[in-house]
Protein backbone atom coordinates (compact mmCIF):
# COMPACT_ATOMS: atom_id res chain seq x y z
CA UNK A 1 0.00 0.00 0.00
CA UNK A 2 2.96 2.38 -0.01
CA UNK A 3 2.34 5.66 -1.76
CA UNK A 4 5.16 6.91 -3.95
CA UNK A 5 6.84 10.13 -2.95
CA UNK A 6 9.58 12.09 -4.65
CA UNK A 7 11.66 14.88 -3.19
CA UNK A 8 13.95 17.16 -5.20
CA UNK A 9 16.28 19.79 -3.82
CA UNK A 10 16.84 22.62 -6.28
CA UNK A 11 19.14 25.57 -6.00
CA UNK A 12 16.56 27.90 -4.48
CA UNK A 13 13.49 25.70 -4.30
CA UNK A 14 12.53 22.33 -2.81
CA UNK A 15 9.83 20.15 -4.34
CA UNK A 16 7.85 17.30 -2.83
CA UNK A 17 5.72 15.22 -5.18
CA UNK A 18 3.24 12.62 -4.01
CA UNK A 19 1.25 10.03 -5.87
CA UNK A 20 -2.46 10.57 -5.40
CA UNK A 21 -4.20 7.25 -4.96
CA UNK A 22 -7.76 7.14 -6.26
CA UNK A 23 -10.33 7.23 -3.47
CA UNK A 24 -13.72 5.53 -3.29
CA UNK A 25 -16.54 7.56 -4.77
CA UNK A 26 -18.23 8.42 -1.50
CA UNK A 27 -14.99 9.42 0.30
CA UNK A 28 -14.26 13.12 0.69
CA UNK A 29 -11.00 13.88 -0.97
CA UNK A 30 -8.77 16.19 1.02
CA UNK A 31 -6.14 17.83 -1.09
CA UNK A 32 -3.18 17.74 1.32
CA UNK A 33 -3.02 14.47 3.17
CA UNK A 34 0.49 13.20 2.84
CA UNK A 35 2.41 16.44 2.88
CA UNK A 36 2.51 18.01 6.33
CA UNK A 37 3.76 21.39 7.45
CA UNK A 38 6.05 21.13 10.47
CA UNK A 39 6.86 24.84 10.66
CA UNK A 40 6.93 27.88 8.37
CA UNK A 41 10.10 26.63 6.74
CA UNK A 42 9.90 22.82 7.06
CA UNK A 43 7.59 20.37 5.33
CA UNK A 44 7.44 16.61 5.49
CA UNK A 45 6.01 13.78 3.42
CA UNK A 46 5.86 10.19 4.61
CA UNK A 47 5.43 6.74 3.13
CA UNK A 48 3.99 3.92 5.16
CA UNK A 49 1.56 3.81 8.05
CA UNK A 50 -0.30 7.10 8.13
CA UNK A 51 -1.25 6.76 11.79
CA UNK A 52 2.36 6.23 12.86
CA UNK A 53 3.49 9.22 10.87
CA UNK A 54 0.79 11.36 12.41
CA UNK A 55 2.33 10.82 15.84
CA UNK A 56 5.73 11.79 14.52
CA UNK A 57 4.35 14.90 12.87
CA UNK A 58 2.69 16.01 16.11
CA UNK A 59 5.86 15.52 18.15
CA UNK A 60 7.96 17.26 15.51
CA UNK A 61 5.62 20.25 15.41
CA UNK A 62 5.89 20.67 19.16
CA UNK A 63 9.66 20.32 19.02
CA UNK A 64 9.90 23.03 16.35
CA UNK A 65 8.15 25.48 18.66
CA UNK A 66 10.00 24.30 21.73
CA UNK A 67 13.30 24.92 19.97
CA UNK A 68 12.15 28.40 18.97
CA UNK A 69 11.29 29.11 22.57
CA UNK A 70 14.55 28.00 24.17
CA UNK A 71 17.03 28.93 21.47
CA UNK A 72 15.20 31.91 19.93
CA UNK A 73 15.90 30.58 16.44
CA UNK A 74 13.86 28.39 14.05
CA UNK A 75 15.03 24.79 13.83
CA UNK A 76 17.57 23.80 11.23
CA UNK A 77 16.53 20.96 8.95
CA UNK A 78 19.29 18.81 10.35
CA UNK A 79 18.09 19.37 13.91
CA UNK A 80 14.48 18.44 13.34
CA UNK A 81 15.48 15.46 11.22
CA UNK A 82 17.79 14.31 13.98
CA UNK A 83 14.96 14.74 16.47
CA UNK A 84 12.55 12.62 14.43
CA UNK A 85 15.23 10.02 13.79
CA UNK A 86 16.14 9.85 17.49
CA UNK A 87 12.47 9.39 18.33
CA UNK A 88 12.20 6.54 15.83
CA UNK A 89 15.33 4.90 17.25
CA UNK A 90 13.92 4.99 20.77
CA UNK A 91 11.07 2.79 19.65
CA UNK A 92 13.45 0.24 18.17
CA UNK A 93 15.11 -0.24 21.54
CA UNK A 94 12.18 -0.10 23.93
CA UNK A 95 10.33 -2.75 25.81
CA UNK A 96 6.92 -3.60 24.44
CA UNK A 97 6.94 -1.12 21.59
CA UNK A 98 7.21 -1.55 17.85
CA UNK A 99 9.10 0.72 15.44
CA UNK A 100 7.29 3.47 13.56
CA UNK A 101 6.23 2.11 10.20
CA UNK A 102 6.97 5.11 8.05
CA UNK A 103 9.83 6.68 6.12
CA UNK A 104 9.80 10.45 6.14
CA UNK A 105 11.06 12.91 3.55
CA UNK A 106 11.80 16.15 5.38
CA UNK A 107 12.64 19.22 3.40
CA UNK A 108 12.83 22.94 3.67
CA UNK A 109 15.21 25.84 4.16
CA UNK A 110 17.55 26.70 7.00
CA UNK A 111 17.58 30.22 8.38
CA UNK A 112 20.52 31.13 6.18
CA UNK A 113 18.68 30.11 3.00
CA UNK A 114 20.30 26.78 2.21
CA UNK A 115 17.80 24.13 1.10
CA UNK A 116 17.98 20.59 2.44
CA UNK A 117 16.28 17.27 1.83
CA UNK A 118 16.53 14.49 4.39
CA UNK A 119 15.19 10.95 4.52
CA UNK A 120 14.55 9.11 7.79
CA UNK A 121 13.94 5.38 8.06
CA UNK A 122 12.05 3.33 10.66
CA UNK A 123 15.41 2.19 11.99
CA UNK A 124 16.20 5.72 13.07
CA UNK A 125 18.90 6.53 10.52
CA UNK A 126 18.78 9.71 8.53
CA UNK A 127 20.56 10.72 5.35
CA UNK A 128 20.68 13.85 3.26
CA UNK A 129 19.86 13.71 -0.44
CA UNK A 130 19.82 15.92 -3.49
CA UNK A 131 16.84 13.97 -4.76
CA UNK A 132 15.18 10.82 -3.50
CA UNK A 133 12.03 8.77 -3.47
CA UNK A 134 10.24 6.53 -1.00
CA UNK A 135 7.30 4.22 -1.23
CA UNK A 136 6.10 2.06 -4.08
CA UNK A 137 8.70 1.41 -6.78
CA UNK A 138 11.06 3.81 -5.07
CA UNK A 139 14.09 2.04 -6.51
CA UNK A 140 13.00 2.56 -10.12
CA UNK A 141 12.30 6.21 -9.49
CA UNK A 142 15.60 6.71 -7.71
CA UNK A 143 17.46 5.28 -10.68
CA UNK A 144 15.59 7.69 -12.94
CA UNK A 145 16.56 10.57 -10.67
CA UNK A 146 20.19 9.47 -10.63
CA UNK A 147 20.23 9.53 -14.41
CA UNK A 148 18.54 12.86 -14.85
CA UNK A 149 19.49 14.95 -11.81
CA UNK A 150 22.08 17.64 -12.41
CA UNK A 151 22.75 21.03 -10.91
CA UNK A 152 21.71 22.74 -14.15
CA UNK A 153 18.46 20.83 -14.44
CA UNK A 154 17.31 22.00 -11.01
CA UNK A 155 18.79 25.49 -11.12
CA UNK A 156 15.32 27.07 -11.36
CA UNK A 157 11.85 26.27 -10.07
CA UNK A 158 10.49 24.91 -13.34
CA UNK A 159 13.41 22.56 -13.78
CA UNK A 160 13.09 21.13 -10.32
CA UNK A 161 9.33 20.69 -10.55
CA UNK A 162 9.61 19.06 -13.93
CA UNK A 163 12.17 16.62 -12.68
CA UNK A 164 10.00 15.66 -9.73
CA UNK A 165 6.88 15.20 -11.85
CA UNK A 166 8.76 13.25 -14.51
CA UNK A 167 10.10 10.95 -11.83
CA UNK A 168 6.60 10.41 -10.48
CA UNK A 169 5.17 9.74 -13.91
CA UNK A 170 7.69 6.96 -14.47
CA UNK A 171 5.60 4.83 -12.21
CA UNK A 172 2.29 6.59 -11.78
CA UNK A 173 -0.40 6.59 -14.43
CA UNK A 174 -0.01 9.73 -16.50
CA UNK A 175 -2.37 12.54 -15.62
CA UNK A 176 -2.43 15.69 -13.53
CA UNK A 177 -5.08 14.27 -11.22
CA UNK A 178 -2.78 11.46 -10.10
CA UNK A 179 -0.04 13.60 -8.63
CA UNK A 180 0.21 16.28 -5.98
CA UNK A 181 3.15 18.67 -5.90
CA UNK A 182 4.24 21.00 -3.11
CA UNK A 183 6.85 23.69 -3.60
CA UNK A 184 8.72 25.71 -1.04
CA UNK A 185 11.07 28.65 -1.41
CA UNK A 186 13.15 30.46 1.19
CA UNK A 187 11.06 32.76 3.39
CA UNK A 188 7.91 31.72 1.57
CA UNK A 189 5.19 29.41 2.85
CA UNK A 190 4.54 26.09 1.18
CA UNK A 191 2.62 26.24 -2.08
CA UNK A 192 0.61 23.41 -3.62
CA UNK A 193 0.58 23.49 -7.40
CA UNK A 194 -2.95 23.83 -8.73
CA UNK A 195 -4.46 21.46 -11.23
CA UNK A 196 -4.10 23.74 -14.26
CA UNK A 197 -0.40 24.30 -13.67
CA UNK A 198 0.08 20.56 -13.17
CA UNK A 199 -1.79 19.74 -16.36
CA UNK A 200 0.42 22.14 -18.25
CA UNK A 201 3.57 20.58 -16.78
CA UNK A 202 2.35 17.07 -17.59
CA UNK A 203 1.56 18.16 -21.13
CA UNK A 204 5.05 19.67 -21.48
CA UNK A 205 6.60 16.46 -20.21
CA UNK A 206 4.58 14.37 -22.64
CA UNK A 207 5.72 16.59 -25.49
CA UNK A 208 9.35 16.31 -24.44
CA UNK A 209 9.04 12.54 -24.22
CA UNK A 210 7.63 12.42 -27.72
CA UNK A 211 10.42 14.62 -29.02
CA UNK A 212 13.02 12.39 -27.41
CA UNK A 213 11.37 9.30 -28.90
CA UNK A 214 11.44 10.99 -32.33
CA UNK A 215 15.12 11.82 -31.95
CA UNK A 216 15.94 8.24 -31.02
CA UNK A 217 14.08 6.94 -34.01
CA UNK A 218 15.88 9.36 -36.32
CA UNK A 219 19.32 8.52 -34.88
CA UNK A 220 18.60 4.82 -35.29
CA UNK A 221 17.80 5.38 -38.97
CA UNK B 1 28.43 17.45 63.94
CA UNK B 2 28.26 21.00 65.19
CA UNK B 3 26.98 22.32 61.87
CA UNK B 4 24.06 19.91 61.93
CA UNK B 5 23.09 21.05 65.42
CA UNK B 6 23.29 24.70 64.33
CA UNK B 7 20.83 24.00 61.56
CA UNK B 8 18.58 21.94 63.77
CA UNK B 9 19.13 19.12 61.34
CA UNK B 10 18.96 15.47 62.33
CA UNK B 11 20.06 12.46 60.36
CA UNK B 12 16.53 11.06 60.34
CA UNK B 13 15.15 14.13 58.62
CA UNK B 14 17.48 13.52 55.66
CA UNK B 15 15.57 11.37 53.16
CA UNK B 16 17.81 9.31 50.92
CA UNK B 17 16.57 8.00 47.59
CA UNK B 18 14.38 4.89 47.70
CA UNK B 19 16.74 2.73 45.66
CA UNK B 20 19.45 3.21 48.28
CA UNK B 21 17.56 1.53 51.08
CA UNK B 22 19.81 -1.48 50.91
CA UNK B 23 22.84 0.74 51.22
CA UNK B 24 21.41 2.47 54.26
CA UNK B 25 20.89 -0.81 56.04
CA UNK B 26 24.34 -2.12 55.29
CA UNK B 27 25.94 1.29 55.92
CA UNK B 28 28.56 0.77 53.25
CA UNK B 29 30.81 3.79 53.68
CA UNK B 30 32.17 4.18 50.13
CA UNK B 31 28.65 4.14 48.75
CA UNK B 32 27.63 6.70 51.35
CA UNK B 33 29.56 9.32 49.44
CA UNK B 34 27.43 8.98 46.34
CA UNK B 35 24.32 8.63 48.49
CA UNK B 36 24.86 11.81 50.44
CA UNK B 37 26.47 13.71 47.57
CA UNK B 38 23.96 12.90 44.85
CA UNK B 39 24.12 16.54 43.86
CA UNK B 40 27.40 15.85 42.11
CA UNK B 41 25.87 13.58 39.50
CA UNK B 42 23.46 15.98 37.83
CA UNK B 43 23.03 19.71 38.29
CA UNK B 44 19.54 19.45 36.85
CA UNK B 45 18.41 17.21 39.70
CA UNK B 46 19.71 18.82 42.83
CA UNK B 47 18.47 17.29 46.04
CA UNK B 48 15.65 19.37 47.41
CA UNK B 49 16.61 21.25 50.55
CA UNK B 50 14.98 19.91 53.68
CA UNK B 51 14.00 23.41 54.66
CA UNK B 52 10.84 25.17 53.55
CA UNK B 53 11.07 27.62 50.69
CA UNK B 54 10.30 30.64 52.91
CA UNK B 55 13.08 29.79 55.34
CA UNK B 56 15.65 29.39 52.61
CA UNK B 57 14.85 32.57 50.72
CA UNK B 58 14.69 34.75 53.81
CA UNK B 59 17.90 33.28 55.19
CA UNK B 60 16.35 33.02 58.60
CA UNK B 61 16.91 29.34 59.36
CA UNK B 62 20.12 29.73 61.33
CA UNK B 63 19.76 29.75 65.09
CA UNK B 64 22.61 30.61 67.46
CA UNK B 65 23.26 28.98 70.84
CA UNK B 66 20.68 31.19 72.57
CA UNK B 67 17.94 30.29 70.14
CA UNK B 68 17.96 33.64 68.40
CA UNK B 69 17.76 33.72 64.63
CA UNK B 70 20.86 34.68 62.67
CA UNK B 71 20.22 36.30 59.34
CA UNK B 72 22.69 35.40 56.58
CA UNK B 73 23.52 38.44 54.56
CA UNK B 74 23.65 38.00 50.82
CA UNK B 75 24.99 41.25 49.49
CA UNK B 76 25.46 41.96 45.84
CA UNK B 77 28.62 43.73 46.97
CA UNK B 78 30.25 44.27 43.66
CA UNK B 79 30.39 46.39 40.54
CA UNK B 80 30.26 44.81 37.12
CA UNK B 81 29.46 46.48 33.87
CA UNK B 82 29.20 45.67 30.18
CA UNK B 83 28.30 47.59 27.09
CA UNK B 84 28.21 47.21 23.32
CA UNK B 85 29.90 49.63 20.98
CA UNK B 86 30.94 49.77 17.34
CA UNK B 87 33.69 47.18 17.72
CA UNK B 88 32.21 44.61 20.07
CA UNK B 89 31.59 44.49 23.80
CA UNK B 90 33.56 45.77 26.80
CA UNK B 91 33.21 44.03 30.16
CA UNK B 92 34.75 45.57 33.26
CA UNK B 93 34.55 44.21 36.82
CA UNK B 94 36.00 44.79 40.28
CA UNK B 95 37.31 41.95 42.46
CA UNK B 96 36.10 42.40 46.04
CA UNK B 97 34.12 39.71 47.86
CA UNK B 98 32.39 40.90 51.01
CA UNK B 99 29.90 39.43 53.47
CA UNK B 100 28.53 42.25 55.53
CA UNK B 101 31.42 44.34 56.83
CA UNK B 102 34.03 41.65 56.30
CA UNK B 103 36.07 41.71 53.12
CA UNK B 104 36.57 38.08 52.21
CA UNK B 105 38.86 38.58 49.24
CA UNK B 106 40.30 41.35 47.15
CA UNK B 107 41.15 39.31 44.11
CA UNK B 108 38.07 37.41 43.04
CA UNK B 109 37.79 36.67 39.34
CA UNK B 110 34.35 38.00 38.54
CA UNK B 111 34.52 37.33 34.85
CA UNK B 112 33.95 33.68 34.10
CA UNK B 113 35.22 32.35 30.81
CA UNK B 114 32.46 30.08 29.56
CA UNK B 115 34.27 29.39 26.31
CA UNK B 116 36.42 31.18 23.75
CA UNK B 117 33.67 33.47 22.59
CA UNK B 118 31.31 33.64 25.61
CA UNK B 119 31.90 35.41 28.89
CA UNK B 120 29.81 35.61 32.05
CA UNK B 121 30.11 38.07 34.91
CA UNK B 122 29.51 37.45 38.59
CA UNK B 123 27.42 39.46 41.01
CA UNK B 124 25.61 38.28 44.09
CA UNK B 125 26.47 34.89 45.51
CA UNK B 126 29.89 33.84 44.24
CA UNK B 127 29.13 30.14 44.64
CA UNK B 128 25.84 30.41 42.77
CA UNK B 129 27.40 32.33 39.92
CA UNK B 130 30.42 30.09 39.46
CA UNK B 131 28.44 26.87 39.80
CA UNK B 132 25.67 27.73 37.38
CA UNK B 133 27.98 29.33 34.86
CA UNK B 134 30.07 26.17 34.86
CA UNK B 135 26.91 24.13 34.26
CA UNK B 136 26.13 26.56 31.44
CA UNK B 137 29.60 25.98 29.98
CA UNK B 138 28.92 22.25 29.97
CA UNK B 139 25.56 22.75 28.23
CA UNK B 140 27.13 25.08 25.65
CA UNK B 141 29.78 22.52 24.83
CA UNK B 142 27.21 19.75 24.43
CA UNK B 143 25.18 22.02 22.13
CA UNK B 144 28.28 22.67 20.04
CA UNK B 145 29.05 18.97 19.70
CA UNK B 146 25.48 18.00 18.87
CA UNK B 147 24.72 20.74 16.37
CA UNK B 148 28.20 21.26 14.92
CA UNK B 149 27.95 25.00 15.36
CA UNK B 150 28.53 27.43 18.19
CA UNK B 151 25.65 28.26 20.47
CA UNK B 152 24.19 31.74 20.09
CA UNK B 153 24.42 34.20 22.98
CA UNK B 154 20.63 34.35 23.08
CA UNK B 155 20.37 30.60 23.48
CA UNK B 156 23.13 30.42 26.10
CA UNK B 157 21.54 33.13 28.21
CA UNK B 158 18.15 31.47 27.84
CA UNK B 159 19.56 28.13 29.01
CA UNK B 160 20.93 29.83 32.11
CA UNK B 161 17.71 31.72 32.79
CA UNK B 162 15.65 28.53 32.47
CA UNK B 163 18.01 26.58 34.73
CA UNK B 164 17.84 29.22 37.41
CA UNK B 165 14.09 29.70 37.12
CA UNK B 166 13.59 26.14 38.38
CA UNK B 167 15.10 27.26 41.68
CA UNK B 168 13.14 30.50 41.88
CA UNK B 169 12.31 31.29 45.48
CA UNK B 170 14.90 28.91 46.90
CA UNK B 171 17.34 31.65 47.68
CA UNK B 172 19.79 31.68 44.78
CA UNK B 173 21.47 35.01 44.44
CA UNK B 174 23.02 35.96 41.13
CA UNK B 175 22.97 38.85 38.69
CA UNK B 176 25.06 37.99 35.67
CA UNK B 177 25.71 39.28 32.22
CA UNK B 178 26.16 36.72 29.45
CA UNK B 179 28.02 38.28 26.57
CA UNK B 180 29.68 37.06 23.44
CA UNK B 181 29.92 37.17 19.71
CA UNK B 182 27.80 34.90 17.49
CA UNK B 183 26.40 34.75 13.95
CA UNK B 184 24.22 37.76 14.62
CA UNK B 185 27.09 39.84 15.94
CA UNK B 186 27.71 40.97 19.54
CA UNK B 187 25.20 39.83 22.15
CA UNK B 188 24.74 41.09 25.70
CA UNK B 189 22.14 39.67 28.08
CA UNK B 190 21.36 40.26 31.76
CA UNK B 191 20.17 37.18 33.69
CA UNK B 192 19.33 37.09 37.39
CA UNK B 193 18.10 34.68 40.03
CA UNK B 194 14.47 35.77 39.61
CA UNK B 195 14.58 34.41 36.08
CA UNK B 196 14.74 37.87 34.51
CA UNK B 197 16.45 37.87 31.16
CA UNK B 198 16.96 41.18 29.44
CA UNK B 199 18.67 42.04 26.19
CA UNK B 200 20.41 45.37 26.07
CA UNK B 201 23.34 47.51 25.02
CA UNK B 202 24.54 48.65 28.43
CA UNK B 203 24.25 47.08 31.89
CA UNK B 204 25.80 47.61 35.28
CA UNK B 205 25.13 45.26 38.19
CA UNK B 206 25.90 45.30 41.89
CA UNK B 207 26.02 47.68 44.82
CA UNK B 208 28.38 49.98 42.93
CA UNK B 209 26.31 49.98 39.77
CA UNK B 210 24.74 53.33 40.55
CA UNK B 211 28.12 55.05 40.48
CA UNK B 212 29.17 53.16 37.38
CA UNK B 213 25.96 54.15 35.58
CA UNK B 214 26.70 57.78 36.36
CA UNK B 215 30.05 57.64 34.61
CA UNK B 216 28.80 55.42 31.75
CA UNK B 217 25.69 57.37 30.92
CA UNK B 218 27.70 60.57 30.86
CA UNK B 219 30.36 59.51 28.36
CA UNK B 220 28.99 56.53 26.43
CA UNK B 221 28.90 56.80 22.65
CA UNK B 222 28.43 53.90 20.23
CA UNK B 223 31.14 55.21 17.91
CA UNK B 224 33.93 55.12 20.51
CA UNK B 225 37.30 53.70 19.55
CA UNK B 226 38.61 50.56 21.26
CA UNK B 227 40.85 52.56 23.59
CA UNK B 228 38.11 55.00 24.52
CA UNK B 229 35.69 52.21 25.27
CA UNK B 230 38.16 50.27 27.41
CA UNK B 231 39.07 53.40 29.30
CA UNK B 232 35.42 54.24 29.88
CA UNK B 233 34.77 50.81 31.36
CA UNK B 234 37.86 51.05 33.54
CA UNK B 235 36.99 54.52 34.75
CA UNK B 236 33.45 53.63 35.63
CA UNK B 237 34.62 50.74 37.82
CA UNK B 238 37.27 52.90 39.49
CA UNK B 239 34.73 55.55 40.40
CA UNK B 240 32.42 52.88 41.77
CA UNK B 241 35.16 51.30 43.88
CA UNK B 242 36.02 54.72 45.25
CA UNK B 243 32.56 55.40 46.63
CA UNK B 244 31.07 51.93 47.21
CA UNK B 245 32.29 49.90 50.16
CA UNK B 246 31.29 46.66 48.56
CA UNK B 247 33.56 47.16 45.56
CA UNK B 248 37.30 47.34 45.28
CA UNK B 249 40.44 45.41 44.54
CA UNK B 250 41.59 44.83 40.99
CA UNK B 251 39.82 46.31 37.99
CA UNK B 252 39.70 43.82 35.10
CA UNK B 253 38.72 44.85 31.58
CA UNK B 254 37.84 42.40 28.82
CA UNK B 255 37.01 43.08 25.18
CA UNK B 256 34.90 40.78 22.99
CA UNK B 257 35.23 40.92 19.21
CA UNK B 258 34.42 38.56 16.35
CA UNK B 259 37.62 36.66 17.16
CA UNK B 260 36.51 35.97 20.73
CA UNK B 261 37.34 37.58 24.05
CA UNK B 262 40.61 39.16 25.09
CA UNK B 263 41.76 40.34 28.51
CA UNK B 264 42.81 43.95 28.17
CA UNK B 265 44.05 44.92 31.61
CA UNK B 266 43.97 44.16 35.32
CA UNK B 267 45.10 46.98 37.56
CA UNK B 268 44.59 47.88 41.18
CA UNK B 269 41.70 50.30 41.61
CA UNK B 270 43.49 52.62 43.99
CA UNK B 271 46.52 52.98 41.72
CA UNK B 272 44.16 53.90 38.92
CA UNK B 273 42.30 56.36 41.12
CA UNK B 274 45.52 58.11 42.03
CA UNK B 275 46.46 58.24 38.36
CA UNK B 276 43.16 59.90 37.49
CA UNK B 277 43.56 62.35 40.36
CA UNK B 278 47.02 63.28 39.11
CA UNK B 279 45.66 63.78 35.58
CA UNK B 280 42.89 65.99 36.95
CA UNK B 281 45.42 68.19 38.74
CA UNK B 282 47.28 68.95 35.52
Image: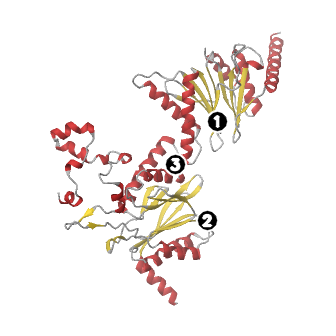
In the picture shown, does residue B276 fall above or below A200? below
Mark pair 3, 2: CA separation: 22 Å
Q: Do the dots labelled 1 and 3 sit on one chain? A: no
- Where residue B71 sits: x, y (%)? 31, 67
The chain to which mark 2 is attached is B
Q: Which residue is mark 3?
A: B150
Q: Secondary structure at mark 3?
A: loop
Residue neighbourhood size for the residue with mark 1, other residues' Cα within 10 Å, grouped as few (<14), some (14–19), many (≥20): many
**Who is closer to the viewer here, B63 or B137?**
B63
The disc numbered 3 marks a residue on which chain?
A: B
Looking at the image, tell me whether mark 3 or mark 2 is earlier in sequence order: 2
Residue ID at (17%, 39%): B25
Q: Residue furthest bottom?
A: B281
Q: Are marks 3 and 2 on the same chain?
A: yes
Residue drawn at x 42%, y 54% is B168
Distance from the alpha carbon under mark 1 to that under mark 2: 35 Å
Q: Quadrant of the N terminus of chain A?
A: top right
Q: Which residue is mark 1?
A: A108
* Tag shown at residue B86: 2
* Mark whose residue sits in front, 1 or 2: 1
Quick one: B266 or A41, which is closer to the camera? A41
Amino acid sequence: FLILQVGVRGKDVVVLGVEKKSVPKLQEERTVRKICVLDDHVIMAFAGLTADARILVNRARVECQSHKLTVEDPVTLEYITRYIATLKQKYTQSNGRRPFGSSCLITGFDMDGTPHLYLTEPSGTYTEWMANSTGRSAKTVREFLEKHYSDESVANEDGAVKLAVRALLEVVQSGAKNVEVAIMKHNEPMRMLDVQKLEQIVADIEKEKEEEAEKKKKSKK
Amino acid sequence: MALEALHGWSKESFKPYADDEELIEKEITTASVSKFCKNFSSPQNLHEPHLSKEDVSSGSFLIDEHGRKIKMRFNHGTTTLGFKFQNGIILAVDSRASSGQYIGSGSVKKIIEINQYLLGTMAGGAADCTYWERVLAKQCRIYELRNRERISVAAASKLLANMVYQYKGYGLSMGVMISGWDKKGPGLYYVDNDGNRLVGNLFSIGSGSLYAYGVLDDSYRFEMTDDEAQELGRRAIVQATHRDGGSGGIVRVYHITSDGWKKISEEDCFDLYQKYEAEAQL
